[in-house]
């Protein structure tokens, strides 16, 4: 009992309230940021100056048909990866899954990049 009173005497009610408020605010911002990223998360295929938005729907995409590159992209469970490429080093294939904001798999010989873009589109009319 005496040790409990010592602990309580060290912390004042205001200290406990302040620490609790900081923890609640931190948790709120962490959860809000994650939800915001999901809302604006796009899977983008960049081919030189061409940008193509891809679907997050589970699929295997043949880039030969889409942009005339000997590559294949797999999209599965909210992740994407290059599964086939005719480039010599296969860096794009070995990159593995991309899923988070800013993740990217790039194939320099084919001038192709698979990018997860989470920037919010702002449609501003002037």
Image: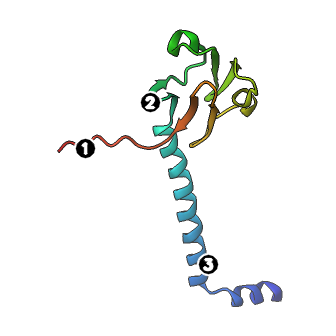
Q: In the figure, is residue 112 to the left or right of 86?
A: left
- What secondary structure is marked by label 1? loop
Q: Where 106 sits versus 88, above or below?
A: below
Q: Residue at x 51, y 13 (%)?
A: 66
- Look at mark 1 in the image and give the residue it sits on: 124
Seen from the viewer's position, the closer of residues 31 and 36 is: 36
- Look at mark 2 in the image and give the residue it sits on: 49
Seen from the viewer's position, the closer of residues 111 and 126 is: 111
- What secondary structure is marked by label 3? helix
Q: Position of residue 16 (x, y in %)?
A: 61, 78
Q: Position of residue 99 (x, y in %)?
A: 62, 35
- As drawn, the label of residue 16 is 3
Question: Quarter of the image containing the C terminus?
Answer: top left
Residue 110 occupies which quadrant of the picture? top right
Q: Residue at x 20, y 42 (%)?
A: 125
Q: In the figure, is residue 3 to the left or right of 116?
A: right
Seen from the viewer's position, the closer of residues 82 and 16 is: 82
Seen from the viewer's position, the closer of residues 76 and 61 is: 61
Q: Where 49 sits versus 118, above or below?
A: above
Question: Quarter of the image containing the N terminus?
Answer: bottom right
Q: Position of residue 31 (x, y in %)?
A: 55, 51
Q: In the figure, is residue 37 to the left or right of 100?
A: left
Q: How many marks?
A: 3
Q: Residue at x 56, y 42 (%)?
A: 101
Q: Position of residue 119 (x, y in %)?
A: 45, 43
Question: Within 10 Å of the Cα at label 3, are there few (<14), some (14-19), or many (20+) other Cα atoms?
Answer: few
Residue 85 occupies which quadrant of the picture? top right
């Amino acid at each position: 009992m005496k040790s409990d009173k010592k602990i309580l005497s060290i912390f004042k009610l205001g200290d406990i309230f302040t620490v609790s408020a900081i923890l609640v605010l931190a948790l709120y911002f962490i959860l809000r940021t994650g939800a915001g990223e999901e809302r604006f998360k796009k899977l983008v295929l960049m081919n030189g100056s061409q940008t193509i938005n891809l679907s997050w729907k589970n699929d295997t995409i043949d880039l030969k048909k889409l942009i005339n590159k000997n590559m294949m992209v797999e999209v599965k469970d909210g992740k994407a990866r290059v599964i086939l490429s005719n480039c010599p080093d296969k860096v794009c294939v070995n990159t593995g899954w991309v899923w988070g904001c800013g993740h990217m798999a790039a194939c320099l010989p084919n001038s192709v990049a698979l990018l997860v873009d989470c920037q919010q589109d702002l449609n501003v009319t002037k």
